[in-house]
Every structure is written in structure tokens, then in C-alpha cells.
Image (tube, grey):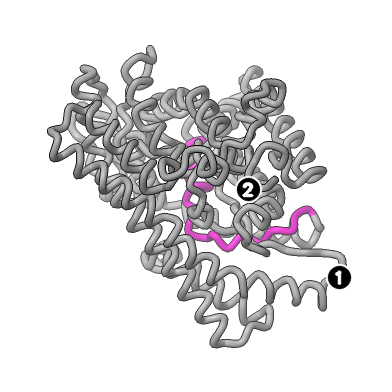
Amino acid sequence: MDWNGIIQGILGVGAQVLIPILIIILGLIFGMKPSKAILSGLYLGTGFIGMSMAINQLTETVSPAAKALAKYTGINLPAVDFGWTGAAAITWSWTLAFLFFAVEIVVNLVMLLAKMTDTMNADMWNVWGIALTGYMVYQISGSLIWGFICGAIQVVICLKLGDMWSKEIANMLGYEGVTVTHIEAFTAIIMSPINKLMDYIPIFNREWDASSLKRKIGVFSEPVTMGAIIGLVLALAGRYSIGDALNLSVTVGAVMAIFPVMAKFFMDALTPFGSTMSDFMKKHVKGRTFSIGLDWPILGQSTELWVTMVLMIPVSIVYAAILPGNTILPIAGVINYCIGVGGLLLTGGNLLRMLVLGVIYEPVFLYGASYFANIFTKLAKSSTSIKVPAGSQVSWSSIEAPELRFVMAWAGKGNIWAIIGLVALLALFWLLYRSFKKNPIPALKYSKLK
């Protein structure tokens, strides 16, 4: 039996179908009425589809502007940025990729039974990210076993990230019983030391979320207005004509206004689901509460998330031009979800902190993409899903957790500095985890959750 073909067929329906089906099944298990379970699943699918359409529109709109900006800065770099879609496509072409479903499921079950996590990950579509880690580690370390071990380590990290964020997400966005288990959120770990230093700088401890800004600057804090201004500035930087600049301005503003509307479908889907699951746990599993792990778009109603990611576009282009050793121009991956998601969850929506952290940590992703270009190119050439231009490389400019994948890969080769780096990174993760468990919303003192 061709298990790989079966898995590929199931995944072919996309996250917008697969995850809602899982939510419907879980809803029925937890005791939801069939009509409500189906409605929750359909609303969730609507939210994912709507959010994907808005994200695709934003990417298609700003990518030409990013290219234009790069053209006028004289950037000519060899690696082609194929974004997360290209990375996912070539990852599933690896014959062993589907085995990481077993890694995800087994590790999650063991941790649930051992009471090491309270998160059940339903984000099965993104197992490709675990498989990608396994492949990268295998290619550098030469050990397939170590590749699978690192995949398992990533599963553990994602589940513990889910445990970390669940209460903050409930308070910040109103979603009970769900959390984010995407490895993108790992960026919060490397951001945490600088974020801690900001505690001692008064300006960063003020309210800098969209709600507080609205009280201070009125209409200019509205998502549609901020998006229009950002789009206009980006267009003018790319030397667009007045007409094209205004078109980009209106489009970015419209997309920024659409995101919170699309996010409402997540609320309609997840509120009844979370309530039912909570009632089930109180009745049948006393003393424990569980959260369902989902993909990052459930955070999409946060204006701070989108403002940060769009403002980081020109920053990433400038970095690509000036960083020595960088080989990639951010285009398909120019919207850096890692910085947005990690910054939002770490700071509770403090826009100033998110932007400063983004500026500081953007080079990590460009250097990570440059370093892993050879591995991406090798895998892409063995795949029929991506065509690599002659004499070029392919990579992903906003690659998730590049620092974690790098140290895990080289630790597998016995490199002492990589081993020290991996231990230090996991220790930093544990410290932040304990901090969040002790105070689920440490950003409370300077965020809109006040």
C-alpha cells in the first residue's frame, strides 16, 4: 500500500479542509450537538480561507513593491525566495516526510498520558515543518536517526509553546480552549532576552497597542488608515507612479481592514467549541484543562500583528542590501510571520516592542535562509514541484526557527559549540516557559490587556 500517496492525497485538500474536519470530530467527541460541531468546523474553514485570501492578496500586492525597492537599491542576489509554499511543496516530495505524522501523534499521546502537556495538536497539516527539520538535520549531520530525534524535539517544543500561550490567547483574543502550536512562535524565545531588557526602559512599558493608540491619534490608528499609509510609503520608496502608489495604498489598507473581519469567523467557530471542551473536561477529567493546538492565523484579529509584519518589509529589503554574506532577496517570504507571531505572543501586543524586536532579529532569518540555501536547492532539484533556475539557488527568506535547526543539525555532527548552543537555547526556552506558567501574561503591565 502506498502510504505516502494516501497521505499526500489527504493533505491535498489543504489546511482549510483538514483542520475543520478534525475540529468537527473533536467537537462530537466532546459532546457538541452535530449541528453546532459542523457549524464550528465550517466557520473555522471560512476563517482559514478568508485569512489565506487576504494574506495572498497582501503578498501579491507588496511583492512587486519589494522588487521595485530592491531594484532601486541595486540588489542582485543569487538565491530565489520561494516562501513557505515552496518549502512545503519540496518537503512533501521527500519520501520519508509522511513518517513524521507518526512522530507528531506518538509524542503528543505520550506527553498527554504522562501529564507533560495539556495541548492536543490538531494542526496536522503543518507536520511538514517537522519533516523539514528532520531533512535539514539529516543532510548536515548525516544521521537519519538524529533527524527523527530532532523532529520529536520540535514536537515537544511546539506542544509546550501551546501550553505557554493558551491563557494569554484566551485573555487577549477571547478564544477559550485553543492555542498556537506553530514553530513560528519559537522566535519569542530568542527575542526574550532583549524583551526583558526593555522592562528597564520606561518608554517600552507604556501602552503601545492599537486600542491605546486610537485614544491618542484617532483615525490614524485604524487598521485601514495605517495600512494605507504603509502602502503609500512602500510604493513611493519603490518609485511607483502616483496612480500605482495610490492603488497600492488603498489595497494594503483594505487588506488590513479585512483581517479582523475574517478573524471573527475564528471567534464564531472556536467560542462554542472551547466552551463545550471546557465543560467536558470539568465533568470527565477533573483537575485538568486541555487546549487544542491550531495554526497561527487564529491570531489574525490583532492589528499589531499585521502592522508589524508589513512595516518590516522595507526593513528586510534594506538588510538584504547591506548585510555581508546574505544571498537572498525577500520576495515570496517577505512577510515574516515568525517576527509577527513571536513578537505578539511575547509582548502581548506591545507594538513598539514588536517593531524594535523585529528590527533587531530580522538578520537571523536572512542569514538562516542564506545558510540553508544549498539544502533547499538540493531537495528542490530532487522534486518535480519546484523548478530551480539554472545557476541559481532557492531558499526561504523568513524560514522558521533557523537558529534551532542550525544548532540541532551541527550538534548531530558532534560540534561542541553547536551542542552548547542547543543546550543554551533549550535552557532559554525553559526559563521563558516557567515565566509564562508562573504569570500567564507577563506583558499585562504594558499591554492592552491591562
- Residue drawn at the location 50% of the way across and 40% of the way down: 340
Q: Is residue 221 above or below residue 194?
A: below
* Left or right for 289, reference 87: right
The amino acid marked with disc number 1 is Lys
Measured as percent of width and height from the top left, residue 339 is found at: 50, 36
Residue 154 vertical placement versus 74 (above, below) = below
Secondary structure mainly formed by the magenta segment: helix
Q: In terms of sequence position, does the residue under pointer 1 or pointer 2 come before the other? A: 2
Q: Nearer the viewer, residue 14 or 205?
A: 205
Question: Quick one: 261 or 153, which is closer to the camera?
Answer: 261
**Which residue does the image show at 48% across and 53% down from the upper left?**
300
Q: Residue 57, relative to residue 205: is it above or below?
A: below
The residue singled out by tag 1 in the image is 286
Q: What residue sits 66% from the left and 69% below the top?
A: 274
Tell me the residue at 68%/78% (across/down): 30
Q: Nearer the viewer, mark 1 or mark 2?
A: 1
Q: Which residues are magenta?
A: 116-138
Which is nearer the eye, 260 or 272?
260
Q: Is residue 355 magenta?
A: no
What's under tag 2, amino acid-wise? Answer: Cys
Which SS class for mark 2? helix
- Check the picture and name the quadrant holding the C terminus: top right
Give the percent coordinates (x, y) of residue 148: 58, 45
On the question of residue 420 being in view, the answer is: no
Task: Assess disc 2: are there few (<14), some (14-19) or many (≥20) residues with their C-alpha within 10 Å of its C-alpha.
Answer: many
Q: Position of residue 188 (x, y in %)?
A: 61, 36
How far apart in space, not on screen, are marks 1 and 2 (Cα)? 25 Å
Residue named by callout 2:
158
Instruction: Indicate the position of residue 323 as horizontal and vertical percent values.
Output: 38, 15
Mark 1 neighbour class, 10 Å CA radius: few under 14, some 14 to 19, many 20 or more: few
Drawn side of residue 359 relative to residue 226, left or right: right
